[in-house]
Amino acid sequence: TMTTVRQRRVGKGTEAAEDQPSEETSVKPDGKILPGGKLWNILSITVGGIVAISLGLLTSVYVATLHENDLWFSNIKEVEREISFRTECGLYYSYYKQMIQAASIQQGLHGLVYDNKTESVRTINILERMNVYQEVFLSILYRILPIQQYLEPVYFYIYTLFGLQAVYVIALYVTSWLLSGTWLSGLLAACWYITNRVDTTRVEFTIPLRENWALPFFAVQIAAITYLLRAHLQPAQERLTLMVVFIATFLFSLTWQFNQFMMLIQALALFILDSLDMIPTAKVTWLYIIQISGLLLVCVLQFFNSMILGSLLISFNVSVLIARTIQKNLKKGGLLNRLGKLILHVVLVLCLTLLINKFIKKILNLESDEHIFKFLKAKFGFGATRDFDANLYLCEEAFGLLPLNTFSRLSSTLLFYVYGFVLFLLTVAAVIVAFRNLSGSNQVHLKDKMEEYTVTLKPEAAYSLVHTVLFGCLALSTMRMKYLWTSHMCVFASFGLCSAEVWKLILKCLHLYTSQRTQVIKYSIPIITLLYISFKFWPGIMDELSELREFYDPDTVELMNWIKSNTPNTAVFAGSMQLLAGVKLCTGRTLTNHPHYEDKNLRERTKQLAEEISPICSISLQIMDGLGDNEPDLKPSLYPRFCEEIKKNLPSYTMHFTRVFQNKTFHVYKLAKHK
């Protein structure tokens, strides 16, 4: 049988066994655990823990080695190291560098709170606008620890992020272990994470990216939620787990600007499961409160960032708690009665969410996150595709649909096949359980013989199922978000392959079930899978680790060196958002715009720059070149393409712009001063 939905009354022996990550214990008829069983449990947990830590550390060393081999990072110049932090990565790292170079910690913090270098003619609060507390914390740590003589600031930074990969892998390992009851499942999850590295992480080449800071804490939060949803936790265990969930939620929220959207999906998963009576309501309420309080604490630290206060997550969670207070008898009655109440509950929650959110945004005059909704509308064909903000996202490959070749890569390690198999089985089980819960038949006391044939689902397994489905939908629609799905895919697939409940269900359907057969399959199939992965991918990993390359971008290096040597510290640069982040990091010069796009004024400035330099730069006025049909509302531009025309040195351009630098890739023009 798949295990219980509701917490049923059971003997002491079952309670004791439930709290152990390992399933097998030797139990006397009176319910007491035999000494041998307890010893075996301790040994299993110890070995499993050592394997988890070892795999985590090995993953850290692996990605650090790949980074070193790819760039020859230890041997290249400082400017080349900084250029290797491309696009927004360079912007975030620049604040760590700024804090390190400041005369004192206080001066460094003052420079961030009153920053006039990131956006010209504006003083902005970096701590409010961007999620850079991790850079602040790390820079302070570097300054106060006696390590300056042994470790350069850049190494302290990148090693911290590679170290977080160990936390990430250990959290995935533990989640899979908790779900299946065997650490073999955790071992398989970690191996899948490593062999599918191309699709599970990009830390080795986008080190400072916010998600590389945030996802390890998100994985810890999911592991803690998985443990929290187990039956028969002691009050002290529950309180401690809730504290871990809160800390992980807070750190995840603090380190990534997309936190509210990820947690909204998580809140939706909890809402679905609670509505279908598949997880305990009291625990769900605590998780809603933790999400709200974690986000509000981040809001305080970010100087009451209005975008956080106006988030859909806070409006949704508050709406659910209000709606539940209004509808107290939601989980009573027959199937039709409960379905009617449930539909009313969903409508009530949605209406309240929209009302509360609109009310908050009206009071705060909040428009910072409107670009997200414009992007979503345009992406799914519901809005104007001529919108500049939406198109700036849509033209980025990372925000496009998930490429189909992702599935062929995931299938080569057997991960996707196993995932699909487990997903199908547990979805069927969840539908059966949900229907039974809504019809009220689970409230009838079933005898042991009847329970033997009842399909049921653990609350933690139900959560993992809905979590993977919702984040899968997000990944399919937006490629950048695939890392949230693929890492959990490793956990979910390994749990299914090592789960006694899953194999029991299959064998019963085939009329082949015996307890011994289930145990043999539960261990043999994962071990065979691990051997296959090892033999197939170990040589490739060894080749990858022995392959040496070197960073080579002489044109960008020449540009940065020229800017530092030939322009005053007060010079202001305009250009592509991606390049300007590098200019800020390498030269410290002032920018007009940059790749952090979560501010309405900055978006307006970016659009203005595009339109003022030349109307062709505005996405809304572009005409497609080459094959394909242009949309009917597009018209040819009245102006030639600016970046081509300016190179011709025509009088109409030279009276405004003077070329001061050029190489094969870059041209720098100085804006003429007119009286």
Image (cartoon, rainbow, N blue to C red):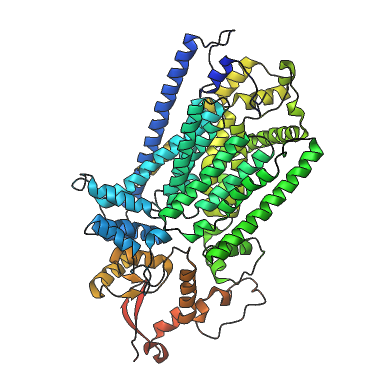
Q: Position of residue 345 (x, y in %)?
A: 71, 46
Q: Which residue is more in the foreground, 309 or 430?
A: 309
What residue is drawn where x is 59% and y is 45%?
267
Q: Quadrant of the N terminus?
A: top right
> Looking at the image, which is closer to me, 548 or 609?
609
Say if 566 sits above or below 45 in the image: below
> In the shown orientation, is residue 433 left or right of residue 279?
right
Of 535 and 474, the residue lying toward us: 474
291 shown above or below 446: below
Q: Is residue 187 visible?
A: yes
Of 548 and 319, the residue lying toward us: 319
Farthest residue to the left: give it. 149
Q: For residue 538, which quarter of the picture?
A: top left
Residue 552 visible to the viewer = no
Q: Where in the figure is residue 87, as x and y percent of width and height?
A: 41, 61
Pinpoint residue 221: horizontal percent, then vertical percent.
49, 40
The number of discs equals 0
Question: Is the residue 68 above or below the residue 400 in the image?
Answer: above
Q: Is residue 590 left or right of residue 5?
A: left
| Residue for point 33% across, 71% down | 590
Q: Residue at 58% across / 73% down in the picture?
A: 626
Quadrant for the C terminus, please.
bottom left
- Residue 493: image x %, image y %? 57, 35
Left-right relation of 584 to 52:
left
